[in-house]
Amino acid sequence: MIISKDLFLLGDQDYLRLPNKDSTRPSMIRPKTNQRYLSKPILGRETESETEPCRLQNMLYSLRLDSTAAHFPCLIPESRQMPVSLAFRGLTVTVGGRQILRDIDGLVRPGQVMAVMGPSGCGKTTLLNCLSGRLQLDSGEISLNREALCKRWKRKICYVLQQDIFFPDLTLRQTLEYTARLRLPDTMAHTQKMQYVDHIIDVLELRSCQDTIIGDYLKRGLSGGEKKRANIACELLTNPSLMLLDEPTSGLDSHAAYNLMTTLKRYAMTEGKAVVVTLHQPSSQIFHLCDKLLLLCGGQTAYQGETCRVVDFFSNIGLHIMPHYNPADFILEQVKRSEEVQQKIIAAAAAARVSKEYPAELQEFMYIPEKLDVTYSPHIEKVTNPEDLSSLDPDVRRLWIDTNSHASSSSSETSDTECYFAWPTSFWTQFKVLSQRNFQEARPRMLSKLNWVQTIGLGMLAGLLWFQLERREEALHDIQGWMFFSTTYWMLFAHFGALSSFPPERDVINKERRSGAYRLSAYYLAKMAGELPLTVTLPAIYHLISYPMLGFHSPVVFFTLLAFLLLNTIVAQSVGFFIGAACMDMQLSITISALYTLSTQLFGGYLATNIPAWLTWMRYLSMVHYAYQNMQIIEFSKGLPIMCSHQSKFDECSESAVIPPTAILEAQGPHMPLWINTCVLMAFFLVFRLLGYFVLRYFRTPK
Ligand SMILES: Nc1ncnc2c1ncn2[C@@H]1O[C@H](COP(=O)(O)OP(=O)(O)OP(=O)(O)O)[C@@H](O)[C@H]1O
């Protein structure tokens, strides 16, 4: 019955070509180096006996996949990962005081795809979170090639989340190139990395949209299906050994979903990857692409084993499928039936665990002490000198690098209790790539057309309002007004810009940090460096327009005023970044920012000069206060003097025709010399930047 159903489902002449007579598996147009992934399991025994229907089904699907194998060449050898067997046993997890998973087992070998299915809320995503190491287990064991899941292994796992998290302004190609440069090892040349990007673009059939921006709800970019494939492409770039995908087909039409799953299946087979996907309601074609099935029911196992045997499993407990019915729909309907039926299925699944056919790896769960399967690569221990590597088989060379990178990182502070890992790239590479990416990503946002119009318009307006002010006491308040307005405007602009841009960026950073792509310190420094030219461009343009209109005195005054305007802007950005990083709630961060920036203005020295004595300390918290004071010191001491009026309010005017700069400052209350103000501004910058870093490092660690 299963055979005829499969033939019915396939319905394509290609499938009906007969397989190679003397092969138990079909003859595949597979790269030679990968042949062993399928022909010889790396670890463990093939304990599950293949039934005749399963074997025929596998052959038919393999043939279907082989018809497109020509599009799927071998990966660049230097980046190849070792094949991995994933086994988990007795996983029990409690979240928020509720037991979500109870005693879950599973086994996926290299080249296999496991589907995790079950009704909504049964714990599929929770299971993937456990397998990726993001969720603490109450009990149970997870092993990869019989080693316990540790930080080093987590590096070889990719987890494709349901949400597609990207920088919306980068094109797909830019996104992939940056990912490759960040996550592929420094040992690979740049051209190889780009070759690899091309390869992945072809694998996921994304060439036609490679120059389209990712987009978001405001800007049209990639379609939903393309975004989904882009998400997978980014993860494939790291060439993981194990792929976990949470509902990769949701939101796709049936054709796109099938294409995607075919691609994954082909990838798993040709590259020897283990793939685990959660699926909601797959078509029968997609269902049969999966080698393994884990069916969950209320957090418990309803079936675990080969996909092609699930119908027999249900038949054996008296639940029979109708002819030509989609088995995926059938099994989902069964696990949603009455409590009694559910218990019957769970009991049958529990009974299967003690049967002879149950995989030995799951019956006796033992970790092996070695870090690598040395039988896989017998030459591995013979190599002691990195220069000898060139003479080796690419697979052996990669494994040597792999072993040694683990060994060399053994003194790393990032060590786990049992295993160690090294960053894929050096600090310098991370800094360089992240600075470029930050610049490219932030440029459309920070230097948008609207921001240019706003800056030029405001510069002109301020220039016209305070046009060619006379250097007389009557115009003193206006000159100060221009300075105060300029410092506060750019403070608000930079502060709220940083505040609003960080939360969406945080999602991308968290995703990348979770996968161990780079050091937080490299990201943090790169963010400062990459955004610096963008942060200072608009205030500089504003100053260039408005200050000469006000009255240009000397280049020294012009550039010194600009320097303090920019310093104040960068400080404000640091404060905005710190608040954005510290507050998860946008409303809260806006409220705190509004309170801080408005009080900064009130105590800046222009709006209120007679501050009550018990509140005077507040002015020392105002960054504007220091920048505004410095601008006055420069403008009034280095620029043309300010002439006294006939009825001057300054006592000094009884003896002099010009107002001394110190008298102007003293009229506004206590003041400090230029160098102290500058040091305080620098201290503001450093303190808030460091605080931002510590918040991200210790309080906003991605789970
Ligand atoms: N942090 C949490 N606190 C409390 N309950 C949680 C938490 N996370 C998940 N759950 C609960 O755990 C159960 C399983 O959630 P999970 O997201 O794993 O289900 P799922 O099978 O992936 O669902 P869907 O198919 O709808 O995505 C749900 O009932 C959910 O409400």
Image (cartoon, grey):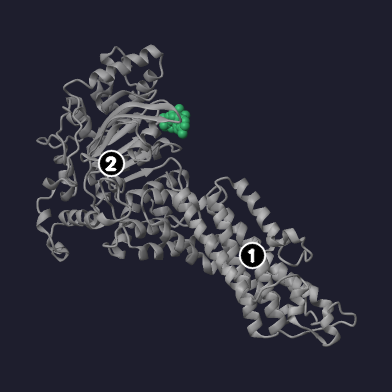
Q: Which residue is mark 1?
A: 623
| Kind of residue at disc 2 | Leu
Which label belongs to residue 149? 2
Q: Is mark 2 within 8 Å of ligand 1?
A: no
**In the image, is 282 to the left or to the right of 69?**
right
**In the image, is 626 to the left or to the right of 167?**
right
Q: Nearer the viewer, mark 1 or mark 2?
A: 1
* Residue at x 29%, y 26% (from the top left corner): 8
Image quadrant where one finds the C terminus: top left
Q: Which percent across, then down, holds residue 163?
A: 46, 42
Relative vertical location of residue 192 with respect to residue 476 in this rendering, above or below: above
**In the image, is 323 to the left or to the right of 96?**
left
Q: Which percent across, then down, holds residue 68?
A: 27, 45
Relative vertical location of residue 333 with respect to residue 97 in this rendering, above or below: above
- In this view, the residue in front, 258 or 51, is 51
Q: Which percent across, then down, holds residue 617?
A: 68, 61
